[in-house]
Image (cartoon, rainbow, N blue to C red):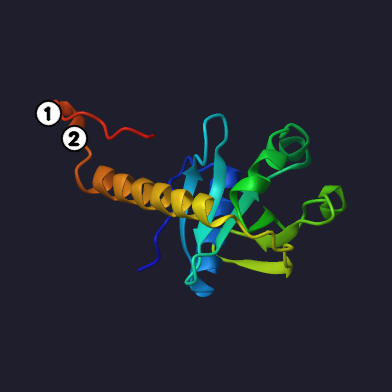
C-alpha cells in the first residue's frame, strides 16, 4: 500500500519525502527537521552505514532559496551538503561546491555529489547521539501521541 502525503503537505515536505526514500536506497537512515545546534534546523539529515552524516536542504522555489541565509551554517555539521530541488528549479542559482539532488514525492537522484568535508570524531559522536535521540523521540510521539497529556515531561533537547 502506498503511503499518501497529508493533504496539507508543503512543497518542501514533498521533496523531503523523496530525499528520504533515495537516502534509504543508498543505505542511509534519515530524519526530517533536525536541529544540529540552536538556531539551525536542517530539512533532512541522513546517517550512513559507516557513520557518514549528510545534510539535505529542500528548496521548492527561487524565493525559498533566496530567503535562506543560514545554509552555510549547516556545513560544519555534516560530511556532505546537498540541495534537493524539483526538476523545474533554476539550478544555476545553487552554489558551486555543494551537492545537488533532483527530487519529487517518490524519489530523488543525485546529479552532483557533494564534496566531502569529514567531521571531527568528537562532533560526529555528538551528532550521532542527537540523531538517535531525535529519531527515538519522533517514534515515541507517533506511538504515544497523548503522552504529554498524562503529565509526562518532554525529553530535553540538549
Image quarter where the N terminus lies is bottom left
Crowding at dot 2, Cα within 10 Å, few <14 / some 14-19 / many 20+, comes out as few
- Viewer-side residue, 107 vs 137: 137
Mark 1 Cα shell of 10 Å, populated few (<14), some (14-19), many (≥20): few
Tell me whether the residue at label 2 lies in contact with that at label 1, contact meaning CB atoms closer than 8 angstroms. yes
User: Eyeballing the image, is 71 above or below 115?
Assistant: above
Answer left or right for 116 relative to 155: right
Q: What numbered label is drawn on residue 146?
A: 2
Secondary structure at numbered mark 1: helix
Residue 146: image x %, image y %? 18, 35
Give the quadrant of residue 153.
Answer: top left
Q: Which residue is painted at 81% across and 50% down in the image?
A: 94
Left or right: 109 as drawn, with respect to 124: right
Residue 121 horizontal/vertical position (percent): 53, 57
Give the residue displayed 57% in from the left and 66% down from the top.
107
At a point 52% along the width and 36% down the height, the residue shown is 37
Question: x, y (%) of residue 22?
Answer: 55, 68
- Image coordinates for residue 7, horizontal then vertical, percent: 46, 44
**What number is the disc on residue 28?**
none
In the figure, residue 98 lies in which quadrant? bottom right
Q: Which residue is mark 1?
A: 150
- Tell me the SS state at disc 2: loop
Side of 133 where 70 appears, left or right: right
List the single residue furthest toward the right.
92
Question: Residue at the spot x=49%, y=71% of the render?
Answer: 50
Alpha carbon distance from label 2 to label 1: 7 Å
Instruction: Determine whether 158 is above or below 116 in the image.
Output: above
Q: Nearer the viewer, residue 4 or 113?
A: 113
Of residues 14 and 44, the one drawn nearer to the viewer in this rendering: 44
- What is the tally of numbered marks visible in this picture? 2
Choose top left, top right, bottom left or bottom right for residue 114.
bottom right
Amino acid at each position: 500500500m502506498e503511503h499518501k502525503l497529508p493533504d496539507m503537505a508543503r512543497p518542501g515536505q514533498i521533496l523531503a519525502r523523496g530525499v528520504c526514500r533515495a537516502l534509504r536506497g543508498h543505505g542511509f537512515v534519515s530524519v526530517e527537521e533536525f536541529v544540529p545546534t540552536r538556531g539551525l534546523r536542517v530539512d533532512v539529515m541522513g546517517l550512513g552505514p559507516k557513520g557518514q552524516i549528510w545534510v539535505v536542504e529542500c528548496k521548492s522555489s527561487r524565493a525559498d532559496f533566496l530567503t535562506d541565509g543560514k545554509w552555510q551554517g549547516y556545513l560544519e555539521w555534516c560530511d556532505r551538503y546537498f540541495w534537493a530541488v524539483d526538476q523545474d528549479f533554476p539550478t544555476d542559482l545553487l552554489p558551486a561546491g555543494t551537492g545537488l539532488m533532483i527530487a519529487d514525492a517518490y524519489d530523488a537522484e543525485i546529479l552532483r555529489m557533494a564534496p566531502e568535508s569529514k567531521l571531527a570524531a568528537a562532533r560526529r559522536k555528538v551528532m550521532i547521539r542527537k540523531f538517535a535521540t531525535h529519531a527515538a523521540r519522533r517514534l515515541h510521539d507517533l506511538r504515544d501521541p497523548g503522552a504529554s497529556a498524562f503529565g509526562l515531561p518532554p525529553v530535553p533537547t540538549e
